[in-house]
Image: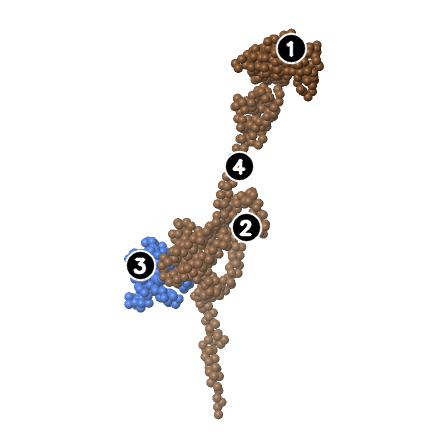
Chain colours: A brown, B blue
Amino acid sequence: MTEKVPPSELSDNSLDKVRELLIGRDDKFVQEKLNRDAKGIVTNVVSEALFERETKDGSVNKVLVPLVEKSLHRSIEANSDKIVGTLYPLVGTLVRKAVSSFLVEFVERTNALIENSLSPKSVSWRFKAWQSGVRYSEFVASQIYQYQVQQLLVIHRETGTLLHSISSDPEKEKDADLISSMLVAINDFVADAFGVTSTESENELGEIKTEDFTLLIKIGPQALLVAAVTGSIPPEVRGKLQQALEDFHQFYQQPLLTYEGDNAPFDGCETILSDCLISERKEGEGKKSNRLIGALVLLVIFFALAVLSFMRLSLSILKSDLHELPPPPGIIVTDTYVSNGNVHAKVLRDPVATSIEQWFSDNNIDAERVTVIEEPFVSLKPSVVERKLEKLVSDYPLSESESLLIKKGDDHSFIISGTVFTPTAINFTQQINAIPGISTVNVDTTALNVKAAYQIDNAELQKAALNRLVNKVSSQNVLFATNQEALSEVQLAKLEPLANDIKQLLTLADKTKTVVSIVVMGASDNSGSSARNRALSQKRAENVVNSLISLGVESDILIPVSLGELPLQKASMGRSVMLNVLISSEQQ
Amino acid sequence: MIQKKVCILGPTGVGKTSLIKQFVEGIFSEKYKTTIGVKIDKKQVNKDGRGVQLLIWDLEGIDRYCGFNPRYLRGASAYIIVVDQTRSQSLLEGMEILELAREHYPDIPAFFVVNKTDLPTSWHWSEEELNPYAQKFASLTKTSAKTGENVESLFSTIAFW
């Protein structure tokens, strides 16, 4: 019986045979074919293949880079001239551009630096920077640069259409809708081009920065908030934008969900957005207002100084005027100085000199601006003495019948004339001599007529004198010894002054038309008989009367009267003669 | 104001940019500058007292080496696929693009535009052969960016679709 060969083995064998026929042993035919047309085949597909491979895993680039480098190397070595020639025009332009932009930046920075280095502000900034551990240049940057949110756009995320925009400058709002579409397009592009993972949100735009401004892009579920900001933005602004976006989504949730392209419902979000349209002009305006304030302060200070100095000056002028002014006689200015906004003057003034106010007003000096410290003194200047003399004469209290005149002679001599009573004359002379410095003046009083003081013609005076005399005489009494009736020598002597008084009294009575009677009363003590005493008293009275008459007194006015015995406690007192004057005016 | 996003797609060189330029600015230039990325224009159309602002996204021409980023179509209220009646291949490419777009955004209406009607029709598609393709779209419009034929009406239709 034949062994059955498994069909697979059989087929395997035959397949191998077929293979050998077709493609040659060890694929000989295929290889030959390939070798013949290799170049052609590859040429046809090389570009696409490279492209496809590159797109697939980017390995082509990786392989090519070192090759290109090497060839570039060799090319430069071999044909440096050519390369230089090619690059030369480019390089020139590049270098120029780079240098110019560098210079501009450098100059600006230097300007800013100089501005900030040579000012007290810069010192404080350095300190603050050191304090907060920040580099000075960074600190300066944060301080100087203002920021301003120029424009805000709210964009529908899906369609890229503009929901609402607000701008600090209305001019810029014109193409906001185009901008929003472009932004969304760029965003799509970026997300697609740089998307490593498939999640969209991770690769969306956050910020677009240029030299002048930055676009901050905050992305929400249905809408984007884009802020165009100039300057360096502090973190608070970003936070504000985020908040505004969230608020927008909250308030406009419904319109967002039903959005079909109509942005009218979103007009109300102006308020949310305007909160974000903030700008902070830091040192710019601050500087301006600071400068303004500084200038104002300086101006005020300057003005104040000017006013003060002007005041000072005027006071100095006043002081020197005062100083140079010749004072009138009797005034001495000892010191002038300026103090407390006023001119002070220390002055010695004789009481008879002109008043200080008068002196000032005569010389056009404003008395209100001068504080005068006045001290009294006695001046010996001749003119002052003369004035005192004249004053003495003119002010002297005189009675009716007196007169005083003063006449100035030449060479400081004065002649006093007039009529005065003796006491007045004495007093007056005393006062003249009391004038200090009177010795420098020649005073001639010889022409002064001095008359007796008691030539009293005045009726009142006479009457007073009369009464006085009346009282005086009435109080007189002559004392006798026991049984004595004649007057002794002593008693007679005593009667003399009495007689004079009586005579004077009578003269006065005459002048004043007064009738006088003098009762002379004799009396005795009560020893002995009453009759004897009576006769004794009479005798005594008569003796006194006779004595008075012998002394020159008129007899008819004397009336002797006997009083008789006087029962007095002291008996000896009774032995006397008393007088009593009785007067009456003629009219009575 | 109502705003609508409209995208224009199509193979390269069919006249997308020229169409937009004709519509927005009213001018036509023979010079050809290929669009890279996307360019956006706006124009307001009015009808019966209603105004609609169209934001037209002019996408770069799509070919095998320059892929098509479907994200651009997001949120569009319509898109236009333009083909060139002087190049047969452009129709097929246009259809490919339609498929791609439909894949990502099946709900957005697509408009079919055959441009360059001012030039003699030199593609080998007849009207009947065109129909099945046209059926896939919301509408078919034959335009010339050079003469401005149907350009206004195209966009007007789209705006008030």
Which residue is denoted by mark 4 in the rendering?
A301
Amino acid at the residue labelled 4: Ile
Which residue is denoted by mark 2 in the rendering?
A138
For the residues beneath circles 4 and 3, the answer to whether they share a chain is: no
For the residues beneath circles 1 and 4, the answer to whether they share a chain is: yes
Label at residue A4: none
Amino acid at the residue labelled 3: Ser
Task: Determine the chain carrying the residue at label 1.
Answer: A
Task: Determine the chain carrying the residue at label 2.
Answer: A
Q: Is residue A280 left or right of residue B1?
A: right
Q: Quadrant of residue B21?
A: bottom left
Report how far apart the C-alphas of labels 3 and 1 lie in the structure: 178 Å
Badge 4, how many Cα within 10 Å: few under 14, some, many 20+? few
Q: Please tell me whether mark 4 or mark 3 is closer to you in this view.
A: 4
Report how far apart the C-alphas of labels 4 and 3 lie in the structure: 74 Å
Amino acid at the residue labelled 1: Glu
Which residue is denoted by mark 3 in the rendering?
B156
Q: Please tell me whether mark 2 or mark 3 is closer to you in this view.
A: 2
Report how far apart the C-alphas of labels 1 and 4 lie in the structure: 114 Å
Residue B67 image position (x, y, % from top left):
41, 63
Q: Please tell me whether mark 1 or mark 4 is closer to you in this view.
A: 1
**Sooner in the amino-acid sequence: mark 4 or mark 2:** 2
Residue A452 visible at all = no
Which residue is denoted by mark 1 in the rendering?
A542
Q: Are marks 1 and 2 in contact (CB under 8 Å)?
A: no
